[in-house]
Image (cartoon, helix red, strand yellow):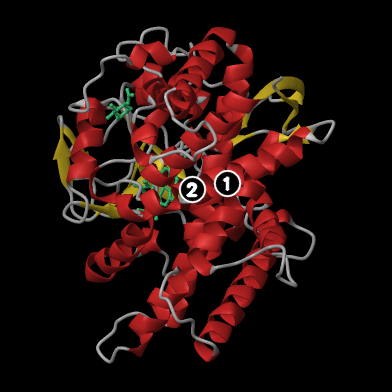
Amino acid sequence: MFSAGFYIGALLIIALTNLLYKWRYPRCNGVLPPGSMGWPLFGETFQFFSPNPTCDIPPFVKDRMQRFGPIFKTSLVGRPVIVSTDADLNYFIFQQEGQLFQSWYPDTFTEVFGRQNVGSLHGFMYKYLKNMVLNLFGPESLKKMLPEVEQTASRNLKLWSSLSSIDIKEATAEMIFGLTAKKLISYDAETSPENLRENFKAFIQGLISFPVDIPGTAYHKCLQGRKRAMTMMKNMLQERREKPRKVQGDFFDYVLEELRREDTILTEAIALDLMFVLLFASFETTSLALTLATKFLSDHPLVLKELTEEHEEIVKRRENPESGLTWNEYKSMKFTFQVINETVRLANIVPAIFRKAIREIKFKGYTIPAGWAVMVCPPAVHLDATRYKDPLDFNPWRWQGTDTHGASRNFMAFGGGMRFCVGTEFTKVQMAVFLHCLVTKYRLKAIEGGEILRTPGLQFPKGFHVQIYEKK
Ligand code: HEM
Ligand SMILES: *[C@@H]1O[C@H](CO)[C@@H](O)[C@H](O)[C@H]1NC(C)=O
């Protein structure tokens, strides 16, 4: 009676229903957290990336926290994900790094960052590379670097004050890139025939884009930018190999010395991947933080006033006002550090920290199946009204008298546990020194832009254009 087409159609519907059911209700030996897996394949990826123009918790997370509670499930870029906005689970995830959880980033990230970057390396190799980085950005190196950071900030501010307006976002990115690239690979933009930063720019513009690699797409440009930057760095490394320098100092020197050892596990490919990640992690994040700090200062005259007083006081206490900043002076900038903390709390430059469950995990009655991704959501912590009163207010005074201890549960702008950001102190030095030079010698007038957009990474779509004048 019925045609073959009917049977095939019926079978297809059954198969699809079955697939959809499996998608919606993944297998689990226990109770999965509540939440929706969205559409097959896409999951809730588009909702996650949908732009929002505020400092608040991303609407994607906020809505689901209200509907499902602090721990919920979703699906992003084809992977099942448990989202954690729960302080205890966050803490547990950071503490169990390498045991129950390991670093994991979506495949598109692995593709653009290289397969062997520090984020996806584990165990021995990882610790070894981290030591190398800590060496370059540890307190001893930073102390030595202080005068250079100050001179760079002074020189740039002087130059900017001669222009009718500058985009602080672009200008600080250029400045910090220059400083970091010089430190890491002795790259000097003024004498180099090629522009390394241009390639990074192309890379960043396509970083959070739909991953279709055909000419014309942002993603394609992103991969091309990375490729060219990698070629440049490879050539620089080769050049160094042929013309070694007398004093060992930068990252290339470390790498070459290590590669010469017989028992080394380092390869040139790994070193170059790491180099790329480091350059990227350092200048983009710090320039976003500095731009937001400048914006906050221009919107909050009382904060600017107290900050200026702190820095004028430092200069006044000196025998010679022209002598450079000392490490002790840097350490004494109490209010400045409050301003920095408050800025990075609201900035949420890293809106999501990803891990993968190595084994099945039971937590607060829920089960996280092995292999699932876990996403810690720092904004949910930083903007929680029970931890920070009036969380959306920029109020550096709220940090007054905070003790270092226990703060880690409430503050994770630089991550936590074993993978805590190795650039934290470097960032603070750069921000504090820049602010010092800015408020002691210059005034700032906002001209245009400064609006933020989160996709969910922080962006300044129109930049932040300001005029900088020398104080009388
Ligand atoms: C405002 C500035 C910055 C912010 C907000 C920031 C934030 C973070 C966060 C949240 C993590 C943890 C990622 C995870 O757990 O998966 C991290 C890791 C890292 N950061 Fe930063 N960072 C900043 C600046 C820097 C700078 C200047 C450098 C380089 C000198 C740097 C190098 C790194 C590296 C190498 C890691 C990986 C550490 C590891 O996996 O053990 N960061 N950062
Ligand atoms: C900034 O935050 C960190 C981490 O919570 C904390 O250890 C430090 O004391 C804070 N600094 C100030 C000045 O409040």
Between the C-alphas of marks 2 and 1, the distance is 6 Å
Whole-percent x and y of residue 8? 55, 57
Q: Return the residue at label 2.
A: 147
Whole-percent x and y of residue 419? 29, 50
Residue at 28 percent across and 25 percent down: it is 410
Please determine whether, in this image, residue 466 is positioned above or below residue 416: above
Q: Nearer the viewer, residue 249 or 236?
A: 249
Q: Residue furthest right?
A: 164
Residue at 33 percent across and 41 percent down: it is 415
Label number found at residue 181? none
Q: Is residue 362 left or right of residue 307?
A: left
Residue type beneath disc 1: Gln
Label number found at residue 151? 1
SS class of the residue under badge 1?
A: helix
Q: Is residue 139 left or right of residue 370?
A: right
Q: Nearer the viewer, residue 430 or 388?
A: 430
Quarter-of-image position of residue 21: top left
Q: Is residue 209 left or right of residue 419?
A: right
Residue type beneath disc 2: Pro
Local packing at callout 1 (Cα closer than 10 Å; few below 14, some 14-19, many 20+) is: some
Can residue 209 be seen in this snapshot? no
Local packing at callout 2 (Cα closer than 10 Å; few below 14, some 14-19, many 20+) is: some
Please determine whether, in this image, residue 113 is positioned above or below residue 330: below
Whole-percent x and y of residue 465? 76, 29
Q: Nearer the viewer, residue 263 or 336?
A: 336
Q: Nearer the viewer, residue 364 or 33?
A: 364
Can residue 181 be seen in this snapshot? yes
Q: Is residue 294 left or right of residue 431?
A: right
Q: Residue furthest front?
A: 319
Marks 2/1 in contact by CB < 8 Å: the verdict is: yes
SS class of the residue under badge 2?
A: helix
Whole-percent x and y of residue 368? 23, 43
